[in-house]
Amino acid sequence: MLRSALFFFTAFCFGLASTAALADFESAKKAFETHDYQTALKQCATDAESGDARCQNILGVLYATGQGVPQDYAEAARWYRKAADQGYSVAQNNLAVFYANGRGVPQDYAEAAKWFRKAADQGYAEAQSALGFHYEHGQGVPQDYAEAAKWYRKAADQGDVDAQNDLEVLLQGR
């Protein structure tokens, strides 16, 4: 699941938030994108503690990558889980990647597939592609090429190039 080990910092504007929380989040997002990790941390810390899933995910990314804080996979997983438990698809995908790779949590393909499924069901293309991979290779789910193709196709239809390639390879080989 090497592709999924990459942390994509997209799709942040999901969900409702108060005006102050939205301003903090937007400020944190901008700071992160400009590599000002200390400001991102500062802007999101309070809102993350108060339950803002987007800020919890940002803290997870900061701890996972060691940007602005010491790298700590267990702490990253803790923040991802807080956001994932609230239904935030980006964090669900990030947590799934951690389970697939055994970062901050024990490696557990079934748990990874569970979290990829939650994000995939919300239309998150990266998770759909990852779920296709898990079905293709029987990681945490029964090997099922038809199910793999279904999930690759969903991601491919959203423009996910990796899923397009994986679907083509799968269909040529079967």
Image (cartoon, rainbow, N blue to C red):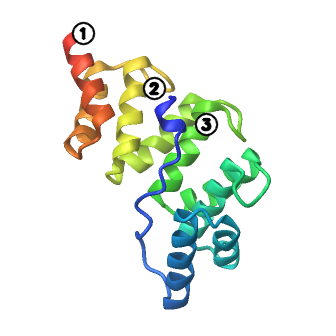
Secondary structure beneath dot 2 equals loop
x, y percent for residue 116: 46, 42
- Contact check, label 2 and label 3, Cβ < 8 Å: no
Name the residue that disc number 3 marks: 99
Check the image and name the residue furthest to the right: 70
Q: Looking at the image, is mark 1 or mark 2 earlier in the sequence?
A: 2
Cα distance between the residues tagged 1 and 2: 20 Å
Q: Looking at the image, is mark 1 or mark 3 earlier in the sequence?
A: 3
Q: Looking at the image, is mark 2 or mark 3 earlier in the sequence?
A: 3
Name the residue that disc number 1 marks: 173
- Contact check, label 1 and label 3, Cβ < 8 Å: no
Cα distance between the residues tagged 2 and 3: 14 Å
Q: Alpha-carbon neighbours of circle 3 within 10 Å: few (<14), some, or many (≥20)?
A: many
* Residue 156 in view, yes or no: yes
Q: Nearer the viewer, residue 71 or 144?
A: 71
Name the residue that disc number 2 marks: 141
Check the image and name the residue furthest to the bottom: 19
